[in-house]
């Protein structure tokens, strides 16, 4: 951040009085610009023994596969956000069900909330952010072409749970390890 969104003056990184970490503070109007993690909401749309995946038409990870997910918007619930992302990315209608995965990604200041969802019909098609959309059985999942570690991890848990006969909420942390952008440490809490 360089300029104040309130008055347009320059901001400085400094620890405000009574605080314990640096914030962007406006030199002119004194506004403290707090920055907090963003929520990413999405779902695993299910149809019988298959799930819906989207192939990304945008960066990052263009051409790779993911479940419908994106940044939560103001004024919506996390379930509404998951349904909206599914409609935007796959033109698919879902009944959003139980929360399935909660993952912290502190290195990019994001928290993922991934729900299970029931596809209401098979009338889906790629939205503007998707190259293609399809239903996959477990054996057809393109594991080497999944766009994000958080999605690969969640789908791994999903198929393990399904094989064991029941789904339960999982939470975990996914943290980039060292300077290698492609290496992650994954901790599952339960
Ligand atoms: Zn200002």
Image (cartoon, rainbow, N blue to C red):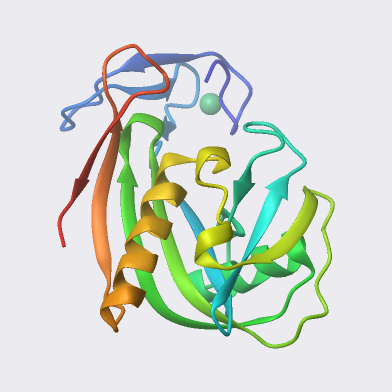
Residue in the picture at 15% in, 56% down: 189
In the displayed image of the protein, which residue is found farthest to the front? 139
Relative to 44, is 24 on the left or the right? left
Taking depth in this image into account, of 75 and 91 the one nearest to the observer is: 91
Q: Quadrant of residue 90?
A: bottom right
Instruction: Check the picture and name the quadrant holding the C terminus.
Output: bottom left
Q: Position of residue 23 (x, y in %)?
A: 34, 25
Q: Of 133 and 23, which appears nearest the observer? A: 133
The percent coordinates of residue 141 (x first, y second) are: 55, 55
Relative image position of residue 55 (x, y in whole percent): 71, 48
- Left of 14 or right of it: where is 108? right
The answer to whether any part of residue 76 appears in the image is: no
68 on left or right of 179 = right
Residue drawn at x 16%, y 28% as measured from the top left: 20
Asked whether the viewer can see residue 147, the reply is yes
Left-right relation of 169 to 83: left
Q: Nearer the viewer, residue 34 or 6?
A: 34
The picture places residue 12, in percent across and down from the top left corner, at: 41, 13
Residue nearest the viewer, comparing 118 with 107: 118
Res 164 quadrant in image:
bottom left
Residue found 49% across the figure and 40% down from its top: 148
The quarter of the displayed image where residue 174 is located: top left
The residue located at (24%, 52%) in the rendering is: 172
Q: Is residue 97 above or below residue 12?
A: below
Q: Is residue 130 above or below residue 92?
A: above
């Amino acid at each position: 951040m360089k300029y104040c969104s309130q008055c347009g003056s320059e901001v400085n990184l400094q620890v405000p009085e009574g605080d314990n970490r640096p914030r962007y503070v406006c030199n002119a109007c004194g506004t403290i610009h707090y920055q907090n993690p963003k929520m990413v909401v999405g779902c695993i749309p299910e149809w019988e023994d298959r799930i819906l995946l989207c192939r990304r038409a945008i960066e990052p990870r263009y051409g790779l596969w993911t479940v419908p997910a994106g940044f939560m918007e103001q004024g919506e619930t996390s379930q509404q956000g998951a349904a909206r992302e599914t409609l935007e990315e796959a033109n698919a209608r879902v009944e959003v069900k139980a929360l399935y995965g909660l993952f912290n990604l502190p290195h990019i200041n994001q928290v993922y909330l991934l729900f299970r969802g029931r596809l209401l019909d098979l009338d889906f098609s790629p939205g503007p952010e998707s190259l293609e959309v399809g239903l996959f059985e477990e054996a057809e999942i393109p594991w080497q072409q999944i766009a994000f570690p958080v999605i690969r991890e969640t789908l791994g848990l999903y198929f393990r749970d399904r094989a064991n006969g029941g789904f339960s909420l999982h939470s975990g942390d996914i943290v980039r390890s060292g300077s290698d952008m492609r290496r992650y440490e994954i901790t599952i809490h339960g």
